[in-house]
Amino acid sequence: MEKLDSYKVDLKGMSEGTVSYSWHVEDNFFSAVQGPEIQQGQLDVALRVKRMAGAYELVFQLEGTVKVLCDRCLDWMDCPISAEHVLRAKLGDEYADDGDLIIVPEDDGLLNVAWNIYEFAALEIPLRHVHAEGTCSQQMTDAIASLSSAGEEEKPVDPRWSALEKLRRKSEE
């Protein structure tokens, strides 16, 4: 986690107003976070922290791409990320995270936003990610086609089923 120390925001030492941060996150960031969805990518992250009466508003803006596996051919593909997310924080007795509000221990006053950056990027990945039509791995596409056509051999239909099918059609008329 030492690699992610540069993503700490000092809430306790912040005066009234707005403070801006910016980072460029790459593959080493994603490997340090050790999240399951993203292992590679390039993102520019801008964070604006606004202190308001006893609370903080954190506005994250993410731009860039992350690498994900194509659901169709299992080859890597770029997934564009362009998002803005808002998070609220305040100082309290002990750390708590209930989604949109994070309570940071007042003794420490530091909030590490690395995991939040990762989560916001992961939220932008669509459920289904596939290459554009015709750009999937040709080797995998050919393998899928050969395997799916192997089971298409016509088997003779049992004559009893044919008789039942005739009865069904007759009853529908």
Image: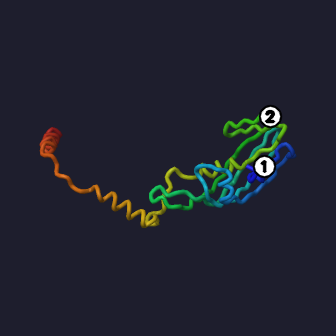
Is residue 77 positioned above or below 109 on the image? below
Q: What residue do we see at 59% from left, 49% from top? A: 36
Q: Quadrant of the C terminus?
A: top left
Residue 161, image x, y percentages: 16, 43
Point out residue 114 in the picture as x, y percentages from the top left corner. Answer: 71, 50
Q: Give the image quarter of residue 154.
A: bottom left
Return the residue at label 2.
92
Residue 70 image position (x, y, % from top left): 49, 58
**Vertical side of 65 occupied by 88: above or below:** above
Quick one: label 1 or label 2, which is nearer the N terminus? 1
Q: Is residue 103 visible?
A: yes
Q: At label 1, which amino acid type do we have? A: Lys
Circle 1 SS class: strand
Secondary structure under tag 2 reads strand
| Closer mark to the observer between disc 1 and disc 2 | 1
From the viewer's perspective, tell me whether residue 82 is left or right of residue 24. left
Q: Describe the colour scheme in one phrase.
A: rainbow
Tell me if 132 is positioned left or right of 4 in this view: left
Quarter of the image where one finds residue 147? bottom left
Residue type, numbered disc 2: Gly
Q: Position of residue 126 (x, y in %)?
A: 54, 52
Mark 1 → mark 2, Cα distance in angstroms = 17 Å
154 vs 101, nearest the viewer: 154
Kindly indicate whether the residue at mark 2 contacts the one at mark 1 (C-beta within 8 angstroms).
no
* Residue at left offset 87%, top offset 45%: 13
Residue found 85% across the figure and 46% down from its top: 14
* Image side of residue 22 versus residue 36, left or right: right
Question: Is residue 47 something that shows in the picture?
Answer: no
Which residue is the site of mark 1?
8
| In the foreground, 33 or 47 | 33
Instruction: Name the residue rendered at 61%, 55% in the picture.
Output: 39
